[in-house]
């Protein structure tokens, strides 16, 4: 699933908890900008997404426009992507 500055993939997790990974390509930015973007996304996910996610694996990939977004705009976009996702069923062990 894709939005203006983020791309999101989800799958059922074999574990009983949610896991979230981030892919933050360079897109012409330096390491300071990339790490700031990763820290912002981690905090947004920790606060608003993880409690409601359930046992799913999520990968969030940033697009070049993500570097220009504010904290609030990133939070709104992550929340809207999560709401639009059809959450897959969990796998049986």
Image (tube, rainbow, N blue to C red):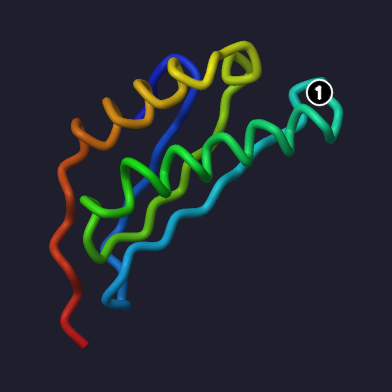
Of residues 78 and 88, the one drawn nearer to the viewer in this rendering: 78
Q: Residue, x 40% and y 26% (percent of image)?
A: 75
Q: How many marks?
A: 1
Q: Give the residue furthest to the right.
A: 30
Which image quarter holds the C terminus?
Answer: bottom left
Q: Residue, x 65% and y 19% (percent of image)?
A: 67
Of residues 75 and 84, the one drawn nearer to the viewer in this rendering: 75
Which image quarter holds the N terminus?
Answer: top left
> Is residue 91 placed above or below 53 in the rendered structure?
below
* Left-right relation of 86 to 23: left
**Residue 33 image offset from top left, x and y in percent:** 77, 27
* Left-right relation of 29 to 47: right
Residue tagged by mark 1? 29
**Residue 70 image offset from top left, x and y in percent:** 54, 14
> Is residue 25 placed above or below 64 in the rendered structure?
below
Secondary structure of residue under mark 1: loop
**Residue 32 image offset from top left, x and y in percent:** 82, 32
* Left-right relation of 61 to 80: right
């Amino acid at each position: 699933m894709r939005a203006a500055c983020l791309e999101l993939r989800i799958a059922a997790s074999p574990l009983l908890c949610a896991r979230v990974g981030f892919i933050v390509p360079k897109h012409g930015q330096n390491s300071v900008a990339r790490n700031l973007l990763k820290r912002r996304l981690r905090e947004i996910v920790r606060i608003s997404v993880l409690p409601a996610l359930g046992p799913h694996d999520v990968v969030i990939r940033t697009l070049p426009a993500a570097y220009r977004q504010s904290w609030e705009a990133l939070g709104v976009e992550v929340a809207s992507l999560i709401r639009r996702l059809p959450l897959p069923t969990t796998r049986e062990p």
